[in-house]
């Protein structure tokens, strides 16, 4: 059961490579595969919610030596959100990406990416985590350059370079930890860190990890690659990246913080709070100065990630639960705004706000399916962004972190400003005279965006039960002994 | 550029390298060798051939294109993990059978060997894919 989210994408990928010339089969099969993945993740989520943390030892090698796969609630929640985003992107892609790109390996690569992302969510071994990161990155390198337009290549050079540098940091940290502790099993390592007094170099290794993951998650000093590369590939690829890739970095930080930050807790808390505050405010301020829809949204990825790190840094159960809920909301709403931006492009042939306008009049439905996720990101009730921010701010106040909470509230206003800006410029103002003539928009692309917008609304309406689930996930994170015991207990005789 | 010396060498080296790669593949589990290095050798055999006779002629000899070979390798690697699932053990648990035990012909076969075959094909396919695209430029 636990291996299925990893081997299914691999099998799908292999089949899609064999059939890469049959366009229609590729489109249909990848949609079905994504649906199958979602069903599997849903089953996994219900089982984890019922039975508690699930583990498996690959190849039956016992825990500190072999590779552990482990699913707790956080992993399961991330898995199902990722596969749902994949379903939506698979519905959207055939109507948006040109046939040349589609037959050049787009679909197999998407499943390669999903395999890496799912692997990173499930693994319980740090080196294995690194391998999944590489699987995911390699697929994303090709996806971002797929088609090879000059702009794309310019973006992908930056993306590939910075990702490699991050990988170097990742491996160095793994090397240091392995030299010190002699184990890379995450549960075993967490256990050792709790019993050894003053394990040397531990903060150094954790800081190297932090750099590696913050590059992936686009946190404050290391975010610059994201707005420089994310707007270059076709929109479904960007949407998939925004919905899944950056969130893997966040997931890993949650996992590592919960397991490994046992010494110098105060240092890490303050450090992460400062990073979170800076990430939020710098992202939102830079977004305000942009005029390309995709760039505005890219900078908003950064600012939103800051909220998640804020919840992590406060590290009370309520704040963590809010951060998890917020992550789910962000994966859906962010993908949705990107997809809606793609529809604008199909309709008017540009992403630049200067050449857009009047969409509200000519295409009210397109306006609506942008309006929902945009207002959700801005935090307007009763959409999920509102609840996410509300609970985060509540968690911040309860923990007495007034400064970061004030920053979060202020950033919320600026987010609203940016979303209103896109809304005013693209949808509300009069069509500029030099705008291109309106083009018909693909129906399946509209259907996909509508589906996602509906999911965003549902996430807001059912905020109670989802929040309850995130609360349980947060409790598992808060008390990592469950996680450690679930892995190590099995192997002790 | 056509070189007679290279062509004759490549023609004779190719079967030798293929056989050698299979030997390296088989002994790989417990001794130096294995799927990766064997795959490199297999790839080298055909790259040498392509250098002597050109990419087009080399590719016309394949039943599988290099990309399909890579995919086939991945498929075999995944399949090698499945017998364990059927037996109720965790994915990828190794299972072994020994044929002709205690004779000169003793042959140990197991799922890790199948996995290695997968790696072998994947590496060879990938190597050829990359090299052929560069050589065609």
Image (cartoon, grey):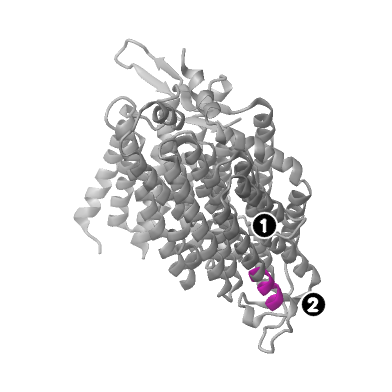
In the image, residue B126 sits, relative to residue A477, either above or below, namely below
Residue A334: which quarter of the image? bottom right
Residue that numbered label 1 is attached to: A333
Residue that numbered label 2 is attached to: A362
Q: Position of residue A469 (x, y in %)?
A: 69, 38
SS label for mark 2:
helix
Mark 1: few/some/many CA within 10 Å (<14, 14-19, 20+): many
In the image, taking residue A484 as reference, residue A54 lies left or right, namely: right
> Chain for mark 2?
A
Real-space CA distance between mark 2 and mark 1, rounded to the nearest whole angstrom: 24 Å
Which of the two discs, 2 and 1, labels the residue nearer the N terminus? 1
Q: Are marks 2 and 1 on the same chain?
A: yes
Where, quadrant-wise, is the N terminus of chain A in this rendering? Answer: top right
Measuring 43% from the left and 60% from the top, which residue is drawn there? A221
Q: Is residue A234 visible?
A: no
Give the residues in magenta.
A418-426
In the image, taking residue A439 as reference, residue A170 lies left or right, namely: left
Measuring 66% from the left and 74% from the top, which residue is drawn there? A421
């Amino acid at each position: 059961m636990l291996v299925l989210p990893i081997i299914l994408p691999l099998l799908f990928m292999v089949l899609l490579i064999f059939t890469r010339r049959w366009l229609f089969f590729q489109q249909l099969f990848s949609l079905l595969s994504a649906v199958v993945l979602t069903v599997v993740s849903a089953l996994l989520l219900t089982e984890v919610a019922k039975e508690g943390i699930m583990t498996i030892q690959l190849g039956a090698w016992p825990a500190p030596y072999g590779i552990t796969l482990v699913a707790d609630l956080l992993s399961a929640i991330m898995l199902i959100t990722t596969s749902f985003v994949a379903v939506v992107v698979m519905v959207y892609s055939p109507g948006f990406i040109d046939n040349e790109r589609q037959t050049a390996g787009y679909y197999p690569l998407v499943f390669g990416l999903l395999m890496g992302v799912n692997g990173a969510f499930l693994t319980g071994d740090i080196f294995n985590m690194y391998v999944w990161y590489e699987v995911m990155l390699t697929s994303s390198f090709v996806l971002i350059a797929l088609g090879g337009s000059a702009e794309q290549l310019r973006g992908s050079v930056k993306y590939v370079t910075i990702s490699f540098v991050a990988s170097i940091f990742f491996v160095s940290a793994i090397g240091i930890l392995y030299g010190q502790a002699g184990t890379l099993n995450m549960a075993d390592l967490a256990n050792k860190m709790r019993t050894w007094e003053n394990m040397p170099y531990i903060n150094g290794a954790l800081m190297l990890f932090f750099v590696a993951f913050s590059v992936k998650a686009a946190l404050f000093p290391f975010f610059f690659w994201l707005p420089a590369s994310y707007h270059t590939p076709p929109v479904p690829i960007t949407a998939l990246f925004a919905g899944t890739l950056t969130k893997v970095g966040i997931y890993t930080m949650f996992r590592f913080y919960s397991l490994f930050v046992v010494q110098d807790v105060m240092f890490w808390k303050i450090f992460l709070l400062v990073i979170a505050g800076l990430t939020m405010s710098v992202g939102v301020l830079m977004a305000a100065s942009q005029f390309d829809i995709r760039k505005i949204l890219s900078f908003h990825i950064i600012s939103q990630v800051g909220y998640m790190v804020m919840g992590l840094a406060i590290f009370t159960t309520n704040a963590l639960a809010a951060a998890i809920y917020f992550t789910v909301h962000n994966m859906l709403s962010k993908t949705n705004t990107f997809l809606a931006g793609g529809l604008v492009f199909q309709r008017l042939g540009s992403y630049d706000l200067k050449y857009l306008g009047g969409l509200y009049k000519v295409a009210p439905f397109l306006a609506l399916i942008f309006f929902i996720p945009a207002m959700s990101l801005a935090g307007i009730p009763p959409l999920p962004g509102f609840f996410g921010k509300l609970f985060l701010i509540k968690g911040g106040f309860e923990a007495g972190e007034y400064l970061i909470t004030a920053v979060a509230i202020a950033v919320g206003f600026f987010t609203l400003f940016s979303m209103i800006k896109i809304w005013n410029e693209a949808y509300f103002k009069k069509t500029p005279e030099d705008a291109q003539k309106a083009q018909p928009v693909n129906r399946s692309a509209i259907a996909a965006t509508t589906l996602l917008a509906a999911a965003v609304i549902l996430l807001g309406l059912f905020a109670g039960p989802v929040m309850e689930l995130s609360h349980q996930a947060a409790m598992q994170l808060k008390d990592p002994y469950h996680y450690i015991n679930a892995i190590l207990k099995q192997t002790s005789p | 550029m056509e070189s007679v010396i290279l062509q004759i060498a490549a023609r004779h080296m190719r079967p030798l390298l293929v056989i050698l790669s299979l030997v390296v593949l088989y002994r790989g589990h417990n001794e130096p060798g294995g799927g990766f290095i064997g795959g490199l050798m297999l790839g080298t055999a055909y790259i040498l051939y392509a250098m002597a006779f050109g990419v087009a002629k080399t590719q016309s000899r394949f039943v599988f294109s290099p990309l399909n070979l890579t995919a086939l390798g991945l498929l075999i690697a995944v399949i090698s993990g499945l017998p364990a699932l059927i037996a109720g053990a965790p994915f990828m648990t190794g299972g072994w059978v020994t044929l002709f035990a205690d004779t000169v012909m003793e042959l140990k076969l197991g799922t890790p060997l199948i996995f290695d075959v997968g790696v072998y094909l994947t590496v060879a396919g990938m190597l050829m894919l990359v090299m052929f695209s560069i050589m065609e430029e």
